[in-house]
Image: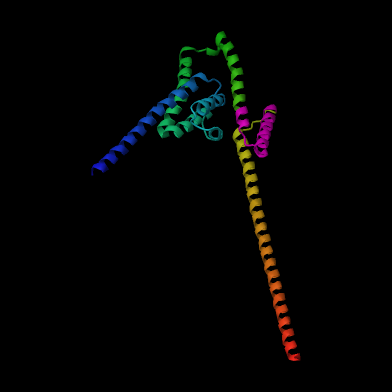
Amino acid sequence: MFVEEMKTGESTDKSTDKRISKGWRSWELCATFMGVGLFTFGGGYAMISVIEDICVHRKKWISHEEMMDMTVIAESTPGPIAINCATFVGYRQAGLLGAVMATLGVVLPSFAVIYLISVFLDNFLEIQVIAHAFKGIKAAVGILIVNAAVNMLKKLPPAPLPKGIALCSFGVMFLADLLSMDLSSIVLMLAAGAVSLAFAVGKECGRQGGAELKGTGQSDAVQKSTEQSGTEQKGVEQSDAMQKGAGQKGGDLR
């Protein structure tokens, strides 16, 4: 009875420690993504590089592969990409509470800044100091987006198919911008996924066909070997019969 009570107490303590750990991790997620939302300009694509630096390199909450998968999923689902990334990382680290806290952390700074600007400054961008500052910010945002793209390209698998899809996607998007065509990035990602799936299915079918051909060849070889063995056995029996007949004939002559 006493042992059971001790085990129950230990399990309760572990459960309490786990809840406390998740609570502290949730606040850490909120503070971390609040910093991302407060000091990152240029929207979700500019935040990708910052989120990767913090979540992959510094905090080690997710791996490089998970970051790439998360970016693709976040871009494919409704909502801003930075918010989706924050929700994903928060859920991975602290469950539903972590997802909520990380999402609030990345949203609240932007909401507060835009609200204050709309209330106190009617012509915010017409202020010369702010206008000149934003010119430099725009250039830095472009560099952040390019940096995120280069890091993703470096982490692509060494196979030629992913690199070919990335090159073709870049060419299609460049032509679409050059010709002022309205091309959704979601359509491009779905097309890239369809191409990759088609190649995977074709490769699997070819592998199965090769296995069947190999199995058929082995079966033919076994059958041929069996026939040869039967022929050899038949020859041996005929030879024994001839020797036996010759021996009987020699006995008769005697």
Q: Relative to 248, is 88 above or below?
A: above
Identified at 73% across, 89% down, the residue is: 251
| 155 part of magenta stretch | yes
- The magenta-colored residue range is 149-178
| 94 part of magenta stretch | no
Q: Quadrant of residue 130?
A: top right
Report whether 16 appears left or right of 239. Answer: left
Count of picture labels: 0
Percent across and percent down for residue 24 are: 39, 27
Percent across and percent down for residue 43 are: 54, 23
Residue 107 shows in the view:
no
Q: Residue furthest front?
A: 254
Q: Relative to 148, is 140 above or below?
A: above
Q: Relative to 132, is 40 above or below?
A: below
Q: Relative to 52, is 201 above or below?
A: below
Percent across and percent down for residue 119 are: 45, 15
* Image quadrant where one finds the C terminus: bottom right
Here the colouring is: rainbow
Identified at 48% across, 27% down, the residue is: 59
Please, what is the dominant secondary structure of the magenta stretch?
Answer: helix
Residue 31 shows in the view:
yes
Percent across and percent down for residue 178 are: 70, 27
